[in-house]
Image (spheres, rainbow, N blue to C red):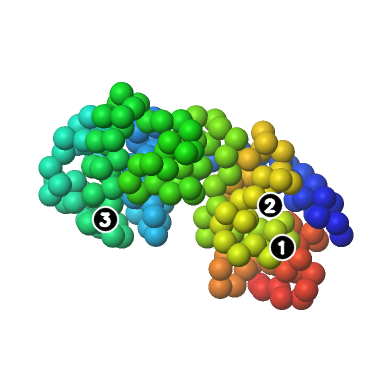
Amino acid sequence: MTTDERYSHVIDWFKENMPVAETELKHDDPYQLMVAVILSAQCTDKRVNLITPVFYSHFPTVESLAGANRDDVFDLIRTCSYPNNKTEHLIGASKIIVSDFDGRLPQEVEQLMTLPGIGRKTANVIASIAFNKQALAVDTHVFRVSARIGLTTGAKNPLETEQQLIKNIPGELHSIAHHWLILHGRYVCVARKPKCGECGLRDWCRYAAEGEVGG
């Protein structure tokens, strides 16, 4: 099977079986998405979604968060991972948005990456979801699933995975492809024991073809 054939089959399967694929982080605007994405680092979306409703009620705008007391922010996010660092990132990012971007979250990946707590992956997430940019974020799920299926070959890090994926996936599908791969990795192609027996991609999966299948 060629790389083009594998991509074609995988994309067609997702289009048919997962026509709607969206982030599971709850948000109503770009500011809220930024908060949720920063909190989601090494933390489950489920946990983040328990924290953010109260957080948004206390800090409804980027301006309110920029002027927040550190202890107040920490107290609201203390149940997520690394609350000390994330407190600094949330306040620091908000201050820069207010001072350098007139209170509006920047739309370009390179600008987003200048904010504390926002690396390339999270910048791609925000640009894609909030601003409909052609960006494809690579997290641990995307990195793992892409390699297992055979969409990537020899990628040593998320950037190399991203480069291979965007080369082979049409630009208008970059955003939804990110969610396809995340959700597939979260619920089917799980890390320890992938559920190959119930996977619709099995016929085009390099991992399955090599006989390393799970339940």
Q: Nearer the viewer, residue 150 or 56?
A: 150
User: What is the distance, in whole Å, between disc 3 and disc 2 at their CAs?
Assistant: 32 Å
Looking at the image, residue 9 lies above or below residue 145: above
Judged from the image, the secondary structure of the residue bearing numbered disc 3 is helix
User: What is the distance, in whole Å, between disc 1 and disc 2 at their CAs?
Assistant: 8 Å
Residue marked by disc 1: 153
Residue marked by disc 2: 164
Q: Position of residue 183 (x, y in %)?
A: 57, 52
* Residue under the point 35% across and 54% down: 47
Looking at the image, residue 188 lies above or below residue 87: below
Type of amino acid at the residue the image marks with label 2 = Gln
From the viewer's perspective, is 27 left or right of 171? left
Judged from the image, the secondary structure of the residue bearing numbered disc 1 is loop
Mark positioned earlier in the residue sequence (3 or 2): 3
User: Alpha-carbon neighbours of circle 2 within 10 Å: few (<14), some, or many (≥20)?
Assistant: some
* Residue under the point 66% across and 58% down: 146
Q: Position of residue 10 (x, y in %)?
A: 75, 51
Type of amino acid at the residue the image marks with label 1 = Thr
